[in-house]
Amino acid sequence: MVDTQAAVLDEPAERLEPAVGVVKAVFGSVVTLIALVVLWEVLVRHYNVPGWLLPAPSAIAQAMVEWRADLVVHTGVTLYETLVGFALSIAVSVPLAVLIVYSPLLQNTIYPILLAMQSTPKVAIAPLLALWIGFGAAPKIIVVFLVCFFPIVVSTASGLTAVPPALIDLIRSLSASPMQTFLKIRFPTAMPHIFVGLKIAITFAVVGAVIGEFVGSENGLGYLILVSTSQSRTPLAFGALVLLTVMSIVLYYGVALVERVVVPWAPRN
């Protein structure tokens, strides 16, 4: 009886352990970040580093406040290009991965081409896209699509082929159709793998948008960094970098949150 009561009392503590671990991790990261920023500020002021070379965090914050209206506009442009290109890559990559897994012909013909495309530097493709399409949002979206495409295809294909053969034999013995096998076994098993690719791709997506804006653009955070550095407005360029970093982190954890809701059975890091 005493052992049973003790076990019941221990249950809330066991449930709180993951939350406590998250709080500790976040607290440790925040404290470390604050310490690094303070050290940065002290060193820049102590050694009188020129602001155009390496601005202090306080100067970066001041520039972000002064240029907040422009930063909001440019952030919205980069975020739009990132999300549209990312969504387009999902819409194309997942169905294509399914076709590659179920078609040996496509696996032997299309997959090597995809590998070759992934090996091509996207920085080299961006100028050509600007030449062919122009300087609007389309070239940036295509660059985002290209950098996200391969990780999603590979992760989806790996997940679809990761089903234990014994499980496939079991569901076939129950006279399940190929569509039922896919919907009930293959795709749910592949979901954790797919989200691994999505979390990698969403961070690449921000990089792809900035690459496109570097090559040819009239707006976006990448364009703002390029213009700011050319005019020696280094604090403003660092402010744009801060926003890009925050954007990448928020988008990554946004995808991770969707994973927790859609794939509750996925292993947690």
Image (cartoon, rainbow, N blue to C red):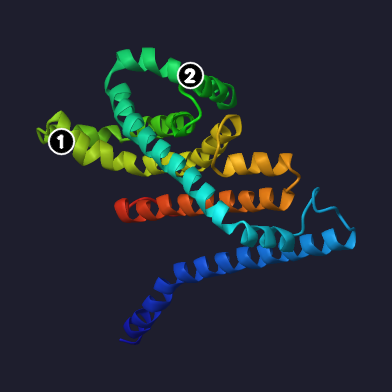
Q: Is residue 4 left or right of residue 79?
A: left
| Residue 227 percent coordinates (x, y) | 66, 40
Judging depth in this view, the residue of 48 and 90 nearest the camera is 48
Disc assigned to residue 218 = none
- Circle 1: is it few (<14), some (14-19), or many (20+) Cα within 10 Å? few
| Residue 34 percent coordinates (x, y) | 68, 66
Q: Amino acid at mark 2?
A: Trp
Q: Is residue 123 left or right of residue 262?
A: right
Q: How far apart are the alpha carbons under marks 2 and 1? A: 44 Å
| Residue 149 percent coordinates (x, y) | 43, 30
Residue at image coords 27%, 38%: 187
Q: Give above or below for 129 relative to 23.
A: above
Mark 1 element type: helix
Q: Give above or below for 117 relative to 141.
A: above
| Residue 145 percent coordinates (x, y) | 43, 31
Work out whether residue 246 can be spotted: no
Q: Compare marks 2 and 1 and give the one earlier in the sequence.
A: 2
Q: Quadrant of residue 96?
A: top left
Work out whether residue 50 can be spotted: yes
Question: In the rendered image, which residue does mark 2 sit on?
Answer: 132
Q: Quadrant of the N terminus?
A: bottom left
Residue at image coords 44%, 15%: 113
Q: Is residue 247 left or right of residue 16?
A: right
Judging depth in this view, the residue of 175 and 230 nearest the camera is 230
Q: Are marks 2 and 1 in contact (CB under 8 Å)?
A: no
Judging depth in this view, the residue of 51 and 250 nearest the camera is 51
Residue at image coords 37%, 44%: 192
Mark 2 element type: helix
Q: Amino acid at mark 1?
A: Gln
Question: In the rendered image, which residue does mark 1 sit on?
Answer: 180
